[in-house]
Image (cartoon, rainbow, N blue to C red):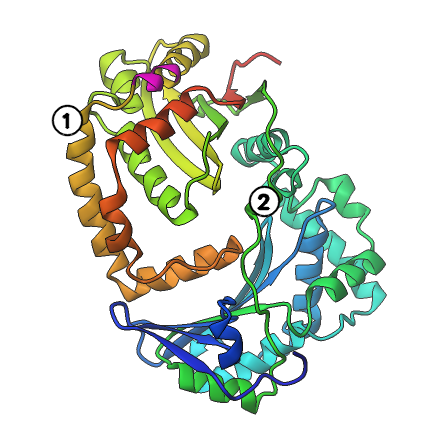
Amino acid sequence: MGGVILGIFMLLHDSVFGSLALALPHSLSLLGIAPAVYVTQTDTPGMIKLTLVVPYEAKEPGYAHYVEHLTWLAAIQGRLASSAPDNNAFTTQDVIMYELAGPQSRLDDMLSSLKRTLEPLAVPRRKADAERNVILREYDFRVVGNPSRQASDVLDAYLYEGGTGGISVLGNPDDIRALSYDKAKALHDATHGPGKAILIASGDTTPEDVADALVRTGFPALALRANIAAHHLKEPGRGKMTVYLSMPQGTRPRMVWRGLANLDLPVSYDLLVVECGLLGDVLSSALAGGIDNELRYNRRLAEGLSIEVIPLDERHVEMRIWAEPDRGVSFDLLASGLDGAVSRLLRGIPPASYERVLRRFRRDLEEENGSPKTRAEVIASRLTELRVPPPPDNAKRLSPELSLLDINILAAALSRTQRVAVVYMGKDVPP
């Protein structure tokens, strides 16, 4: 389906959240193909935000980010008047995103700007070469002197080795200096163009407004699918990596523990997202069975602690723990206590702790999902993961499916993590 987007749309009304989606055309939506245009009405009078999501599969560090810079340079930078809308572009390990926000009256202008990002890349080679220096300055700003960012890149490369999640979005200085304009153009040709992007619109607008504007601006046809495996995860092998990073005098020491776990049986991704959120809340609580309770309150090993459980796909989850040792506690003692707390997840979560957290979790989940703003954020988040957004009644639909048995199965999987990476950051860490 090429050329200009069709003016025939099927409107999918989300009566609970006031969110609507467009599927093109009607016959394709009946086949269950994900819509390529999502429109969510939010309480932002007179304002609209457009996000164009371009999927890609990482093969070399830094290239998608270079394409983002060159595309922005060619299509948008210097073409927006001083009164132009707010704008941004960024790259993740799965997508390149171009974002414009401003008055709803500028909808056509914003779409015309985004349309140019899908046209063949044409940047003078002199400017393309100079853009590498811009990216090097960005590297200095984001990475140099930022141990947390340095650690994240190293841990990603180890944990997701062999998959796209292990390929750095920004790259290192040598990667950046070696970026080829010809290879960037080839990547742009392969990922940008008719039938390859997804559009998100949120704000004070309607599907009809967006549909009419797409036709008026001659916007190219958009993608028909949005669902591919997040990070193209390769089955993680067993192993453990330890990294030491020296930090400036006066900086509080801290450690980051990250582990990948396999699930014995696949779980629906929508349900797994909710289960991981619930288990993360339990483990972060001061209740029996919580890692926070054990390390901060019972044993006083950690002064600061943060825990997150993240679904990667239907069979893999990651747990991330950030911890600051309490006064007088060594990294070795904190690490030993943390490893013990993780292994003891095999015992399961005490029913009383589970029920107490579950009541609050269900209330918060339904309140958050009842907000149009949150609904818009959920849609954007899932599409940037290259997954079809869940239905608007997802929280209410999945809440009854939560059970202590399933949470304990998830906890048991985390207790036997397959692949672990730990970084210690402090003034006196070993070399």
Lower sequence index among marks 1 and 2: 2
Closer to the camera in the image, 257 or 283? 283
Residue 145 on image: x %, y %: 58, 34
Looking at the rendering, the stretch of residues picked out in magenta corresponds to: 343-347
Residue at which label 2 appears: 231
Q: Is residue 428 magenta?
A: no
Observer able to see residue 86: no
Q: Characterize the local packing of mark 2: few (<14), some (14-19) or many (20 or more) Cα atoms within 10 angstroms.
A: many
**Horizontal placement of 355 versus 107: left or right?**
left
- The answer to which image quadrant residue 10 occupies is bottom left
**Horizontal placement of 374 versus 111: left or right?**
left
Residue 115 on image: x %, y %: 62, 78
Disc 1, SS: helix
User: Which residue is drawn at the image coordinates 55% and 91% (left, top)?
Assistant: 216
Tell me the kind of residue under disc 2: His
Closer to the camera in the image, 271 or 331? 271
**Horizontal placement of 251 versus 144: left or right?**
left
Residue 426 on image: x %, y %: 49, 20
